Image (cartoon, grey):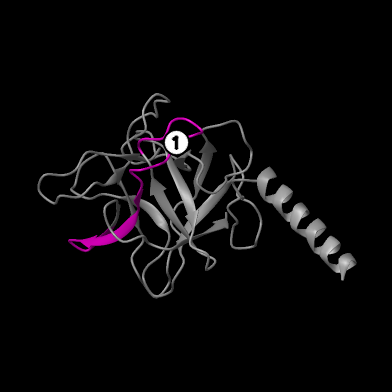
Amino acid sequence: MLRLIGSLSFIWLLMAISTAAQPWPPVLDADGQPLRSGVEYYVLPGVTDVGGGLTLVDRNGSCPLYVGQEPLAPMVSRGIPVVFTPRVGDTIIRESRDFTVEFSGASTCGQSTAWMVVEENPETSRRYVVTGMEPRPSSTLWYFNIENNGQGVYALRWCPNCLTTNCPRPACESAGVIDENGKRLLILDGSAFPFIFRRA
């Protein structure tokens, strides 16, 4: 009996050390591999029959372009690949750790394709995710993170009050997808939309 208790205590100690050593587990792609900085990934819906991957969307006939979702079609598009860049010097994208996101390639507007959050739109009372400006490290508008929902899919989040490693993240908002005039747009202040990531 004492050997069993000793063995269980040792196993518990190893688990505690392992958990303490990795407080931010890696975000995994659809193949179970950690997301890596500088590698292109498609951001795809974690549920079926709702549309394609994330892409650039012309919301109102002018620049900047918005982050949105490819529409549901017989041949659903994967969208445009993105590249994640951690705020801290790491090669792995980790859960609840800040990073910037940028679409690969150029936009038709000739502007940056880095994602950022804009102020609430007074007409719609929504905060959209747009592109078009170069990221500034001193601003929280460009930093997103990923949260695991425990069911094999993830939520994209924006936590504007967290530019240090020890913060409570009181103002986090999950990104959702809405249909606005036939265009599917990524917004905050909505229900979290489930995503998966597939290497391009």
- Tell me if 182 is positioned left or right of 83 in this view: left
Residue 172 part of the magenta segment: yes
Q: Which residue is mark 1?
A: 167
Q: Quadrant of the N terminus?
A: bottom right
Residue 109 part of the magenta segment: no
Q: Is residue 134 above or below residue 149?
A: above
Q: Residue at x 31, y 60 (%)?
A: 177
SS for dot 1:
loop
Residue 142 pos. (x, y %): 38, 36
Could you tell me what secondary structure mostly forms the magenta stretch? loop
The magenta stretch is 160-184
In front: 56, or 124? 124
User: Number of callouts in the render?
Assistant: 1
Density class for disc 1 (Cα within 10 Å; few <14, some 14-19, many ≥20) is few
Residue at the extreme right of the image, as rendered: 3
Q: Is residue 5 above or below residue 128?
A: below
Identify residue type, mark 1. Cys
The answer to which quarter of the image holds residue 167 is top left
Residue 86 pos. (x, y %): 54, 37
Q: Residue at x 85, y 61 (%)?
A: 6
Residue 187 pos. (x, y %): 29, 52
Q: Residue at x 48, y 62 (%)?
A: 149
Q: Quadrant of the C terminus?
A: bottom right
